[in-house]
Image (tube, rainbow, N blue to C red):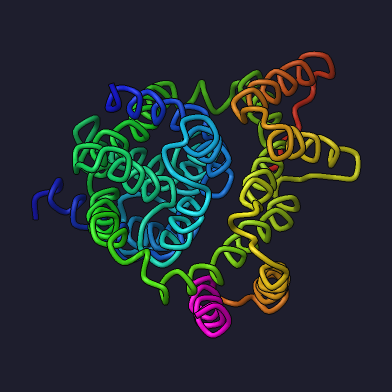
Amino acid sequence: MNIYLDVFLTFSKIGAFTLGGGYAMLPLIEREVVDNKHWLQKEEFLDVIAVAQSLPGVMAVNTSIFIGYRLKGVLGSIVSLLATVLPSFVIILLIAMYFTHFKDNAVVAAIFKGIRPAVVALIAVPVFTTAKSAGITWKTVVIPIIAAILIGFLGVSPIWIVLAAGLGGFLYGKFTGNTKQTEK
Amino acid sequence: MIYLQLFLTYIKIGLFGFGGGYAMLSFIQDEIVAKHQWISVNDFTDIVAVSQMTPGPIGINTATYVGYTVTGSVWGSVVATTAICIPSLVLVLVISYFYEKFRNNKTIASIFSGIRTVVVGLIAAAAISLITPETFIDYYSWIFFIVSFVLVRVFKLNPILLIIIAGGAGWLLYG
């Protein structure tokens, strides 16, 4: 099979069949790219994930661009990007076009009144799991708490927080000479 | 010019949206709901719920949805979704090119480790900013929130099942 077509079909399969967003996509990407297609070694894949996670943007998109580039350069990365995005694009577009029409329906409105607080809980849960994996300790826990208060309660743009945190990390590394490596 | 605004806003979200899925929500919320007021906090929360039940990354899902809602046109979705991917494409291509240098660069590593410490705060901020009088309409909402939290955190309930259960309970209670 043509490699571009193969890349396209593989990534659109990944895009079409993973519920639950970015992190849920990683095991599926690994199975396809490492186990089934042997496009990348396991080590290489873990490297790619580490970099894709540290970059801004949608993680699954970053990962697929990386892999597409490794396989077939710039054109490969564009093919894998399109394939990853296309399934959710089509599905969400259809929902956006038709969902709004029955949103005012009393039953749908009641259902979403129940769903909204549950969604907030869904977002709140990873706060605790991520804190562990990001290597937050009792000494550093004050940093994310301040960030959350500034953004969540005082309306500061998260962009400033990220810039400040990056600068903070830079200065910390410069003056202490050591960089905390949480992964590897 | 709404398309240009949409384009620039999503470029910004793609460029600064560190920390993946849920952390990215705080950037999207800040730009789309708080600043531009393109959609309400209820709509935003609903999109997150829909994103959980449909395939694909949450950042892409919200871009596609907001793009259509704001412009009433498929092109709005195309513009927003393309824009959120452009910074990723450029960054990944540049980094792939300098891969070895990038991986072993101490300065970059310390900048990223600084950013990593606030990612948790970004996720918490996303949750906090969605607790509003519109989304939490009465004390039942808080019961929904606490029960959901325990179900997912302690009993590892699948998010899709949680949304179905919460929706069913909402129907019984408010319908």
- In the rendered view, would you say B168 is above or below A165? below
- Residue A64 at x, y = what percent? 34, 45
Please report the residue visible at 45 percent of the width from the left and 53 percent of the height from the top: B43
User: Residue B156 sits in which quadrant?
Assistant: bottom right
Residue A141 picture quarter: top right
- In the rendered image, the vertical position of residue B39 relative to residue A151, given as above or below: below
Judge from the rendering whether residue B28 lies leftward or rightward of residue B142; answer left or right. left
Position of the C terminus of chain A by quadrant: top right
Q: Is residue B174 above or below residue B27?
A: below
- Residue at x 67% of width, y 57% of height: A124
Which residue is nearer to you in this view: A91 or B1? B1
Q: In the current view of this chain or complex, which residue is farthest to the bottom?
A: B172
Q: Residue furthest right?
A: A139
What kind of secondary structure does the magenta stretch mostly adopt? helix
At 58% from the left and 41% from the top, the residue drawn is: B26
Please name whichever residue, B29 or A9, is drawn nearer the observer in this view of the structure.
B29
Magenta highlight on residue B101: no
Residue B172 belongs to the span the image colors magenta: yes
Q: Position of residue B89 (x, y in %)?
A: 34, 30
Region rendered in magenta: B159-175
Residue B170 x/y as whole percent = 54, 77
Task: Establish if B30 lies above or below B155.
Answer: above
Relative to B174, A1 lies left or right: left
Give whichever of B70, A14 is nearer the camera: B70
A86 sits left or right of A29 in the view? left
Location of the N terminus of chain A (image quadrant): bottom left
Counting from the top left corner in percent of width and height, residue A50 is at 54, 42
| Numbered-mark total | 0
The part of the image, by quadrant, that contains residue A119 is bottom right
